[in-house]
Image (spheres, rainbow, N blue to C red):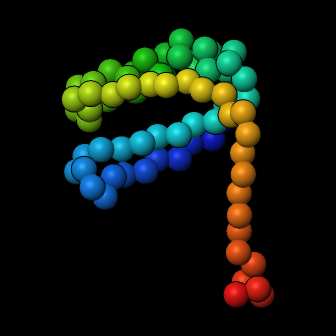
Amino acid sequence: MSIERFQSLATEGKMLSLSWWENEYAVLQWKNHVLHAKAQQEGRESIFDFYKISIAHITREYSFKKDKDNV
């Protein structure tokens, strides 16, 4: 599992969290884990007024990284 969190520059308080999981079973295990339930409760009580969860599969991925020697 890997996670990254981003904060919106345009909308105060808006965040995006991305997480990568080994498989769907791992997602379900975390969903039902006691620590996740506690984190959800804390989020609902003190952090978020609204949240949405979307689960997706990556079909294709592209990337580019400029080499510092080829500037």
Residue 52: x and y in percent read 38, 25
Residue 44 visible here: yes
Tally of numbered tags: 0
Identity of the residue drawn at 72% across and 23% down: 23
Please say if 41 is above or below 58.
above
Please say if 2 is above or below 43.
below
Q: Is residue 15 left or right of residue 63?
A: left
Q: Is residue 6 left or right of residue 9?
A: right
Identity of the residue drawn at 26% across and 32% down: 48
Who is closer to the viewer here, 62 or 51? 62
Instruction: Give the quarter of the figure containing the C terminus.
Output: bottom right
Q: Residue 53 is drawn in which quadrant?
A: top left
Identity of the residue drawn at 72% across and 45% down: 61
Residue 42 visible here: no
Residue 26: x and y in percent read 67, 21
Instruction: Give the quarter of the figure containing the N terminus.
Output: top right
Residue 33: x and y in percent read 54, 16
Q: Is residue 38 left or right of residue 29?
A: left
Please say if 14 is above or below 27.
below
Who is closer to the viewer here, 64 or 5? 64
Q: Is residue 2 left or right of residue 34?
A: right
Identity of the residue drawn at 43% across and 50% down: 6
